[in-house]
Amino acid sequence: MSQHIRHFLQLRDLSQQEIAYLFERTRVIKDRFKRYERYHPLIDRTLVMIFEKASTRTRLSFEAGMQQLGGSAIYMNTRDSQLGRGEPVEDAAQVISRMCDIVMIRTFEQDIIERFAAHSRVPVINGLTNEYHPCQILADIFTFVEHRGAIKGRTVAWIGDSNNVCNTWLQAAELLDFKVHVSTPPGYEVEPERANLTGTGHFEQFADPHDACRGADLVTTDVWTSMGFEAEDAQRREAFENWRVDAAMMGLARANALFMHCLPAHRGEEVDADVIDGPQSVVWDEAENRLHAQKALLEFLMLGRVD
Ligand code: CP
Ligand code: NVA
């Protein structure tokens, strides 16, 4: 396979400089879009999106984004394609990547997307795996920067499950030099190897979620039960009961702290309604920025640097 293909399988596939560049492009692309200025650098290019799990935001932002850049997007899922009937991932990668210019995959184990990428002729983007959700964190950090400036040196409090979104925040902290305070229930702690971290210097684990929130510039959480873990739902509801982000936790963070959630959210479970619907919450900007950040990513992976 060609060596020059750039995949985005986890956040650390990008360097700190490349993330800075992507944020510059996100700004430009977002501003143009807001001014209704046509920008069609991906004319005649096709994105194939493969979903093995449900999605609203990821599908919509990639599909709309690709169209807005002048290209087209094709949606596939495992229920009504051969992908769900045992065709080897390697074969699917060979075929699909001969018919399009870029692929986005939402699947279960990271190993699946890595095997696909190893046999793909075109760039592959991780649209969420059990281990990582790198597109989400690009949008989240862009949103933080829009509201509060550079994230370097800041503190992010992660409350709840040490899941795919948490792992990606931890990678981001290493890449962009900020700190993550993590609080999970016992038995759900961060696994640095699964997060693929180079060290442990950019995060700290707290037994009490209130302590994790103290002095934070951003408080963030996610569902207690991620897709693929539904069998553990009852057990998790019990374990996570005290890991609901509420006004008391937000009150311990900095006065101008933001609240984020990748969505979909469950009010009264991982977050109280008065927090997610309150003045510190930027969840709608966060969701919208998926569109703009991913347009910058699509442009970068297909065209390289354009400035
Ligand atoms: N945050 C996120 O990825 O949402 P979807 O599952 O709706 O794509
Ligand atoms: N952690 C969640 C994120 C959904 C966007 C999941 O994997 O289901």
Image: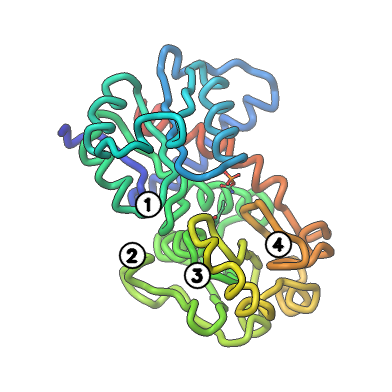
Q: Do the residues labelled 2 and 1 touch (CB within 8 Å)?
A: yes
* Mark 4 or mark 3: whose residue is earlier in sequence: 3
**In the rendered view of the protein, which quadrant contains the N terminus?**
top left
Disc 3 designates what residue? 162
Q: Do the residues labelled 4 and 3 touch (CB within 8 Å)?
A: no
| Placement of 174 over or under 136, stated as above or below | below
* Mark 1 or mark 3: whose residue is earlier in sequence: 1
Label 1 secondary element: loop
Residue 307: tell me if it is visible: no
Q: Nearer the viewer, residue 128 or 171?
A: 128
* Mark 2 or mark 1: whose residue is earlier in sequence: 1
Q: Nearer the viewer, residue 105 or 138?
A: 105
Per the model, the C-alpha gap separating discs 4 and 1 is: 25 Å
Q: Do the residues labelled 4 and 1 touch (CB within 8 Å)?
A: no
**In the rendered view of the protein, which quadrant contains the C terminus?**
top left
Q: Tell me the amino acid under the disc marked 3.
A: Ser
x, y (%) of residue 306? 40, 27
Label 4 secondary element: strand
Disc 4 designates what residue? 258
* Classed neighbour count for the residue bearing mark 2: other residues with Cα under 10 Å, few (<14), some (14–19), many (≥20): some
| Placement of 179 over or under 13, stated as above or below | below
Q: Does residue 65 appear to the left or right of 303 in the view shown? A: right
Per the model, the C-alpha gap separating discs 2 and 3 is: 13 Å
The answer to whether the beta carbon of the residue marked 1 is less than 8 Å from any atom of ligand 2 is: no
Could you say which quadrant of the image residue 167 lies in?
bottom left
x, y (%) of residue 69? 52, 21
Direction top: furthest residue: 44
Disc 2 designates what residue? 196
The answer to whether the beta carbon of the residue marked 4 is less than 8 Å from any atom of ligand 1 is: no
Colouring used for the render: rainbow
Q: Does residue 206 appear to the left or right of 124 in the view shown? A: right
Disc 1 designates what residue? 10
